[in-house]
Amino acid sequence: SYDPAQGAIDHINYYEDHIELLPPFTGAAIGWGFFLEQAGTRYTKVIGNGAFTNTSWQTVSMLNLTAADFPGVDFSISGKPITFGYFRSNSNTGGGYSKTTHGIDNWKVEIFRK
């Protein structure tokens, strides 16, 4: 987490390595993205096409994210504290139960102040 009172945020960089482990069927996708939460509101940023199916480690990043990438968030010095995180989701178009498992490593958020 970060409190913009320590210095307004110019931009942030997001990094992660991820993998899908033991997919329940060929092509099973895991939805993914980055989020930040400020004053009880969650702001999300879907990464890439919004899903991954890779069964080997993949390194991804989103660079130079600004407040404009999260409409409503306040990166200014008067903004409330911000908590950072990632999200995962899955769906099963065939109905019924589906379980997906993923791994994440080297998760990092870099904050660049103005």
Image (cartoon, grey):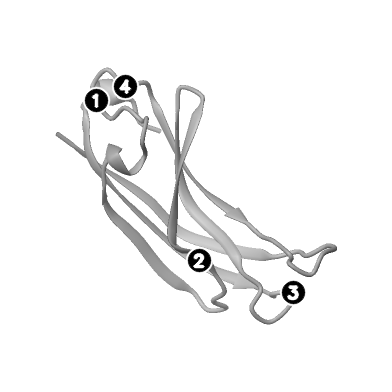
Of circles 2 and 3, the one toward us is 3
Q: In this view, does 89 lie above or below 30?
A: above
For the point 82% across and 64% down, the residue is: 95
User: In the image, what residue type sits under mark 3?
Assistant: Pro
Of the numbered discs 2 and 4, the one sitting upstream in the chain is 2
* x and y, in percent, of residue 29 in the image: 61, 69
Q: Nearer the viewer, residue 20 or 42?
A: 42
Q: Name the residue under label 2.
A: 18
Q: Which quadrant of the figure contains the N terminus?
A: top left
- Indicate the amino acid at tag 1: Ser
Q: How crowded is mark 4: few (under 14 residues within 10 Å), some or many (20 or more)?
A: some
Q: Which of marks 2 and 1 is nearer the N terminus?
A: 2
Alpha carbons under labels 2 and 1: distance apart: 31 Å
Quarter of the picture holding the C terminus: top left
Q: Name the residue under label 1.
A: 76
Q: What element carries label 2?
A: strand
Label 4 sits on residue = 79
User: In which quarter of the view is residue 68 placed?
Assistant: top left
Would you place residue 57 above or below residue 98 in this image? below
Measure the alpha-carbon separation of dots 4 and 3: 43 Å
Residue 97: mark: none
Hey, what amino acid is under mark 4? Gly
Q: Is residue 10 left or right of residue 18?
A: left
Q: Residue at x 60, y 64 (%)?
A: 30
Whole-Å distance between the Cαs marked 3 and 1? Answer: 44 Å
N-term mark: 2 or 3: 2
Residue to which mark 3 is pinned: 24
The first of marks 3 and 1 along the sequence is 3
